[in-house]
Image (cartoon, rainbow, N blue to C red):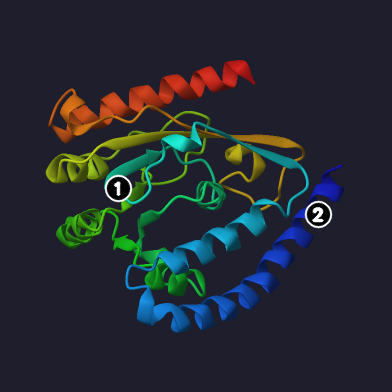
Amino acid sequence: MKLKRTLVSTLVWLIFGVTMVIFFIVFLILWIVSIPFDRKHYFTQWLTWCWCSVYANIYPFWKIEFINKEKLFRNRAAIAVSNHQSLLDIMVLFYMYAYFVWVSKLENFKAPILGQVMRINRYISLVRNDKKTFPKMFEGISKALKENKTIMIFPEGTRSLTEELNRFKEGAFKAAIDNKVPIIPIVLDGTGKTVPKEGMTFSGKTKITVKVLDIIPYENFPSYDPAILKDYVRDIIDAELKLLRKRS
């Protein structure tokens, strides 16, 4: 069984690698064509959705379930936050067809193909543990929010090695407070079992669940202190994560 999973995983990663180059060439061509009429890069976002949806359907042993997807905003300023379990999280969240502007570590922007796509889509970079770069990050977030876009952030900062949530960082919540926009909590489960943080082998049959929780309007924030707000939202996500696991 282990050998079979290794062979299947190798085949899937090979397909990812080959098709990524092909998709990227098509992506570049269509991006260049769309520049004159798509200043806000909605078309390239759509192409990225299509790209990720293909990958979300390649592996035959996982099932992806979305709950309350209709609660996601389109063309409205908000901060979306989700727990982070696996490198598959980004692909699965893209599969919801939402206009996300991602905030991601600078290292991802330097990756071949991935980095170019992120720059073209005008995602926002940050240097972790370097507070000198934070003002530029918050400036980019504010600019995107003024264009009525939804910012997507993993407030844990990195993938969890266990099934427990890491502590949340304050950045996402400071941005929501400073810009007076709502927060959209999202709970994601199952991807950590599919591809663990320390490993590249896919597991066997796995169910992946993504649930969009009730939106928290700015006026309903329990505090306008990021340190308090982050713990409040973390508790909401943590409670719902435990409920999902009980039901599965």
Q: Nearer the viewer, residue 229 or 51?
A: 51
Name the residue type under label 2.
Val
The quadrant of the picture occupied by the N terminus is top right
The residue at 46%/78% (across/down) is 31
Residue at position x 64%, y 21% from top? 248
Q: Residue furthest front?
A: 37
Place of residue 211 in the rendered image (x, y in percent of width and height, measured from the top left)? 50, 32
Position of residue 18 in the picture relative to residue 233 (left or right): right
Tell me the crowding category of disc 1: few under 14, some 14 to 19, or many 20 or more residues within 10 angstroms, Cα based. Answer: some
* Badge 2: residue crowd in 10 Å (few <14, some 14–19, many ≥20): some
* Residue 134, label in figure: none
| Image location of residue 163, percent across then percent down | 53, 30
Q: Secondary structure at mark 2?
A: helix
Residue beneath the point at 59% across and 63% down:
51
The percent coordinates of residue 32 (x first, y second) are 45, 83
Using the rendered view, name the quadrant where residue 34 is placed.
Answer: bottom left
Count the marks.
2
- Residue 165 picture quarter: top left
Name the mark on residue 76.
Answer: 1
Mark whose residue sits in front, 1 or 2: 1
Q: Is residue 78 left or right of residue 220?
A: right
**In terms of image quadrants, where is residue 25?**
bottom right
In the rendered view, does 235 fall on the left or right side of 52? left
Looking at the image, tell me whether mark 1 or mark 2 is earlier in sequence order. Answer: 2
Q: Name the element at disc 1.
A: loop
Q: Are marks 1 and 2 in contact (CB under 8 Å)?
A: no
Q: Find the distance from the CA under tag 1 to the CA under tag 2.
A: 40 Å
Residue type, numbered disc 1: Arg
Residue matched to label 2: 8
Q: Position of residue 48 (x, y in %)?
A: 52, 63
